[in-house]
Image (spheres, rainbow, N blue to C red):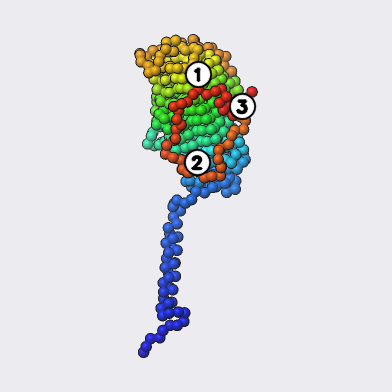
């Protein structure tokens, strides 16, 4: 018998081929579905607050690496912990997006992941810190110095945070530090403002090979404007205004933290002026009226700064415990109207050596021999002058950090706040400081509180 052809829908065998085709499509779809791994990188998203999440923390918890958390104007009474790497937390309006600790919550923004940006917002009234970036944590909460206890750094257990940025952030009335980078590397704090901190407005501590830039910030009405404790090597401060604090800035070695001694920070082109503010929180060590304090700091480059109007001293060198202030170069600075322009008050226990002055504008240097010590310096270690040779000031009592007056509105982040940025680079692009000059008294004056 001759076989019949099937003419019910096409050429002989078409039904079989159609079935095979449909089966193939089904298999392809199945394979594609299996390939949609939730861990596969996807395009960065914008998560809005309160549009996509009611709170900043809820939005941050939703975020994946590369995402932007964009916060609309409002007062957010919460603490935010960022533990996801490579995300950006940004306000739409620096002055109108406020993370408020209400005087009871410890942290404004706690960053414990690599590659995080915090931008264009205000953090206020936290009992510890406005923004804290730290590698010293238990995966949940921070253990940084002065926060919830102190555990000596184990570099293997607590590797430093890599890559961070704090840009155009206002930190006011926080109980310890305004903007705080600790056990962190390859980051920047720029175009920001800090006031009302009962310790330091801006603090960088405990890092080697820091690669951190602190630039174009204002710190006023704090106990200390800027503090560096054991942060060394490729830390650069430039274009900042540290004025109207109790102490302008310090470079210190500290046995309580790892990596002492502090060394090799560049301080260039900053204004450090009029640090005798009465409407400031009192600081435990009681210092007042000082521009720059170097306590056990070594091989720092202090150049082309304007240091004026500090009634105790413009710059003081001393040891801390048995760590001496050594090898610091002080060049091309403008001093004026200070109680004493430069003084070495090192003790016999930690005598100084190798500190030198070149091409500074000064009126008073103690001891006088320090003024003729050109760079590079040689010679034996020696004690400085007694503290009684410096002005004896009447120190005001200070006020609560919660009562320090608030600043004027601050300029917002440049560019489109809705733009999702590329990941932070592995190293910071440092400015060229070869031509830096001492700044005028008007540096960033439009951002300060007057009166």
Name the mark on residue 82: 2
Instruction: Please name the residue that numbered disc 3 is placed on.
Output: 449
The residue mark sitting in front, 3 or 2, is 3
Seen at 41% across and 17% down, the residue is: 356
- Percent from the top left, x then y, of residue 41? 45, 51
Instruction: Please name the residue that numbered disc 1 is placed on.
Output: 334
Q: Residue furthest front?
A: 435
Q: Quick one: quadrant of the C terminus? A: top right
Mark found first going from the N terminus, 1 or 2: 2
**Pick the front one: 60 or 331:** 331
Q: Is residue 9 at all visible to an observer of this figure? A: yes
**Mark 1 → mark 3, Cα distance in angstroms:** 24 Å
**Side (left or right) of 162 relative to 176:** left
Q: Secondary structure at mark 3?
A: loop
Q: Is residue 144 at all visible to an observer of this figure? A: no
Seen at 46% across and 11% down, the residue is: 366
Name the mark on residue 198: none
The residue mark sitting in front, 1 or 2, is 1
Q: Secondary structure at mark 1?
A: strand
**Badge 1: how crowded within 10 Å, few (<14), some, or many (20+)?**
many
- Percent from the top left, x then y, of residue 134? 46, 35
Q: In this picture, is 114 found above or below 361?
A: below
**Badge 3: how crowded within 10 Å, few (<14), some, or many (20+)?**
some
- Percent from the top left, x then y, of residue 190? 51, 33
**Mark 3 → mark 2, Cα distance in angstroms:** 31 Å
Q: In this picture, is 277 found above or below 207?
A: above
């Amino acid at each position: 018998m001759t076989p019949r052809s099937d003419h019910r829908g096409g050429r002989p065998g078409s039904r079989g081929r159609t079935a095979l085709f449909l089966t193939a499509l089904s298999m392809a779809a199945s394979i594609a579905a299996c390939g949609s791994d939730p861990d596969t990188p996807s395009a960065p998203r914008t998560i809005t607050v309160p549009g996509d999440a009611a709170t900043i923390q809820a939005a941050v918890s939703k975020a994946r690496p590369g995402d932007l958390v964009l916060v609309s104007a409002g007062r957010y009474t919460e603490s935010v912990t960022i533990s996801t790497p490579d995300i950006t937390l940004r306000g739409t309006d620096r002055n109108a997006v406020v993370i408020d600790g209400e005087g009871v919550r410890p942290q404004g923004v706690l960053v414990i992941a690599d590659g995080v940006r915090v931008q264009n917002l205000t953090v206020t009234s936290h009992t510890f810190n406005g923004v804290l970036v730290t590698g010293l944590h238990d995966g949940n909460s921070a253990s940084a110095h002065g926060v919830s206890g102190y555990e000596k750094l184990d570099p293997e257990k607590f590797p430093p945070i890599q890559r961070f940025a704090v840009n155009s952030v206002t930190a006011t009335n926080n109980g310890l530090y305004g903007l705080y980078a600790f056990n962190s590397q390859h980051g920047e704090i720029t175009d920001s403002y800090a006031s009302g901190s009962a310790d330091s407005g801006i603090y960088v501590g405990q890092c080697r090979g820091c690669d951190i830039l602190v630039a174009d910030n204002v710190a006023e009405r704090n106990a200390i404007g800027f503090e560096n404790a054991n942060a060394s090597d490729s830390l650069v401060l430039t274009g900042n205004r540290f004025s109207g604090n109790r102490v302008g800035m310090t470079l210190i070695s500290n046995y309580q933290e790892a990596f002492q001694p502090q060394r090799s920070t560049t301080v260039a082109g900053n204004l450090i002026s009029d640090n005798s503010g009465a409407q400031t929180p009192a600081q435990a060590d009681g210092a007042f009226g000082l521009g720059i304090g170097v306590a056990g700091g070594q091989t720092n480059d202090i150049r082309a700064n304007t240091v004026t109007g500090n009634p105790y001293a413009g710059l003081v060198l001393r040891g801390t415990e048995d760590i001496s202030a050594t090898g610091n170069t002080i060049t091309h600075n403008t001093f004026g109207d200070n109680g004493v322009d430069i003084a070495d008050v090192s003790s016999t226990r930690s005598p100084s050596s190798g500190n030198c002055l070149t091409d500074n504008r000064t009126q008073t240097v103690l001891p006088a021999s320090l003024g003729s010590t050109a760079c590079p310096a040689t010679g034996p270690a020696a004690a400085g002058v007694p503290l009684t040779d410096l002005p004896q000031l009447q120190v005001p009592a200070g006020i609560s950090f919660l009562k320090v007056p608030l600043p004027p509105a601050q300029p917002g982040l440049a560019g489109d706040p809705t733009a999702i940025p590329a990941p932070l680079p592995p190293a910071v692009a440092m400015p060229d400081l070869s031509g830096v000059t001492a700044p005028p008294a008007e540096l960033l004056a439009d951002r300060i509180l007057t009166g």
